Image (cartoon, rainbow, N blue to C red):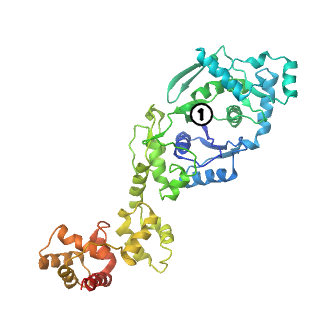
């Protein structure tokens, strides 16, 4: 990268929610740009006016901010139509674009016929054979033209891909790409090239489903500005159970839904930066360490498997290691109905339950268990043992002393000793460390819960 200022872009379309696959690409662009002191450009590809929404665009901006993926410049394609029109007119004057009139049904029939005849389904350029009079008749009959870019089919599109190595695609094996729709709207294939050339993009990092698209775009780049950027095509991500990673509102892989599910942004970043590489997931990673580790040579050519459970597990580990000061405000928000809790008490509470929560919102459940509504449980505790619990409990509520005395007087040990205490105090089979629970509850609360058990049994 010596002598070159790296400029990369993330170009989502605002037609739904960002999902894990989108963010994988955004993150790779971000890490690459930061590693080489470059810039990340965010471009909203909203040329599809029917499907693009302001709501989706706002959510894209919110998701990137929440994840900590910072961009340096911002563009919207809908505000750049004049630039596309100018370049289109130039290519038209040069004879590099031509109007076509076939319907979707006619094109589908052509492809089917070619395939059945053993011919590659490449557009046959029959529109170039139309005379001016024939085109006029079609248009007078209401047939609106769409426009194709005429590829230099005598050449081979070739580039040194940063992930796959050398790639070569003969241009006579692909169809001339459509660049303008019948309604006059510019297609992504063309608009993206004009933007990338105009904005000065040096590297395009995207999914390997764009490889064939890249072959045609390189030829468009050459026609527009005489050179093309560098390319890196990364394998598309799939899920371990075959689910689609999509933009659907209900998708568990959308960023908005992972956020609602309480998953931490650091966990999403850690997992997405690591899967599909030779690195192991390490929840101690910071964004700075991920930048330092980034290298295209570490990316595998096989499709990475995204497991939402890995993200949740990583999120849980990160949350458990957070200091009280880091989550105090959010924790207070979760426990807003208990507004009279002191910082000291809420800190002790957090240290008690943090290893038993998957997300901060789980804290409200444990606060209810420990200070409000003990869950119902049909498991019975021996009355005599309950009385021994009450008898040996000291006002200091010293756990070690209480257990020693209770063990001596009852003769119980192991599960027979500890399990009934947990049931008496929480009515739950599992939970935070018993010693921490005793310290948190204190003498009066413990005595009250044991006494209530005794009264019910009597």
Work out which quarter of the rendered image holds the C terminus and state it.
bottom left
Inspect this view and state whether residue 1 appears: no
Q: Which residue is mark 1?
A: 203
Horizontal side of residue 32 vs 446, given as left or right: right
Answer with the quarter of the image where residue 457 lies. Answer: bottom left
Q: Tag 1's secondary structure?
A: strand
Q: Is residue 181 above or below residue 17?
A: above
Give the residue displayed 18% in from the left and 72% down from the top: 417
State the residue in front, 325 or 241: 241
Q: Position of residue 164 (x, y in %)?
A: 49, 27
Inspect this view and state whether residue 130 appears: yes
Give the residue displayed 45% in from the left and 67% down from the top: 325
State the residue in front, 93 or 53: 53
Q: Position of residue 283 (x, y in %)?
A: 40, 51
Give the residue displayed 20% in from the left and 78% down from the top: 402
Specify few, some or many for label 1: CA neighbours under 10 Å numbering under 14, 14-19, or 20 or more.
many
Work out which quarter of the rendered image holds the N terminus and state it.
top right
């Amino acid at each position: 990268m010596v002598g070159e200022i790296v400029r990369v872009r993330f170009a989502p379309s605002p037609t739904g929610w960002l999902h894990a696959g989108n963010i994988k690409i955004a993150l790779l662009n971000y890490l690459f740009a930061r590693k080489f002191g470059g810039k990340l450009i965010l471009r909203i590809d909203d040329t599809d006016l029917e499907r693009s929404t302001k709501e989706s665009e706002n959510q894209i901006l919110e998701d990137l901010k929440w994840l900590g993926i910072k961009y340096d410049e911002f563009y919207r394609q809908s505000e750049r139509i004049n630039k596309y029109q100018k370049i289109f007119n130039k290519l038209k004057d040069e004879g590099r674009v031509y109007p076509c009139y076939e319907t979707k049904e006619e094109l589908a029939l052509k492809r089917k016929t070619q395939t059945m005849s053993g011919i590659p389904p490449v557009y046959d350029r029959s529109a170039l054979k139309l005379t001016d009079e024939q085109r006029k008749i079609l248009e007078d009959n209401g047939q609106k033209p769409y426009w194709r870019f005429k590829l230099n089919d005598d050449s081979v599109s070739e580039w040194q891909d940063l992930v796959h190595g050398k790639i070569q695609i003969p241009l006579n094996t692909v169809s001339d790409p459509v660049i303008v729709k019948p309604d006059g709207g510019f297609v992504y294939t063309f608009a993206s090239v004009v933007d990338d050339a105009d904005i000065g993009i040096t590297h395009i990092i995207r999914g390997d489903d764009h490889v064939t698209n890249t072959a045609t775009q390189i030829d468009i780049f050459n026609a527009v500005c005489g050179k093309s950027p560098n390319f890196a095509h990364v394998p598309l991500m799939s899920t371990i159970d075959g689910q689609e990673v999509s933009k659907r509102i209900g998708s568990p892989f959308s960023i908005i839904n992972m956020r609602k599910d309480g998953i931490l942004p650091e966990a999403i970043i850690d997992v997405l930066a690591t899967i599909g590489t030779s690195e192991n997931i390490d929840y101690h990673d910071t964004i700075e360490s991920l930048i330092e580790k980034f290298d295209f040579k570490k990316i595998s050519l096989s499709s990475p498997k995204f497991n939402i459970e890995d993200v949740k597990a990583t999120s849980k580990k990160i949350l458990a290691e957070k200091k009280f000061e880091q989550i105090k405000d959010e924790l207070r928000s979760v426990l807003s109905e208990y507004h009279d809790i002191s910082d000291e008490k809420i800190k002790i509470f957090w240290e008690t339950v943090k290893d038993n929560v998957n997300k901060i919102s789980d804290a409200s459940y444990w606060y209810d268990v420990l200070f409000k509504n003990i869950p119902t449980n049909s498991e019975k505790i021996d009355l005599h043992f309950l009385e021994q619990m009450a008898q040996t409990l000291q006002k200091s509520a010293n756990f070690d002393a209480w257990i020693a005395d209770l063990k001596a007087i009852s003769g119980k040990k192991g599960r027979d000793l500890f399990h009934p205490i947990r049931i008496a105090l929480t009515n739950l089979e599992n939970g935070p460390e018993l010693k921490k629970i005793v310290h948190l509850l204190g003498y009066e609360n413990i005595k009250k819960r044991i006494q209530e058990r005794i009264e019910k049994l009597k």
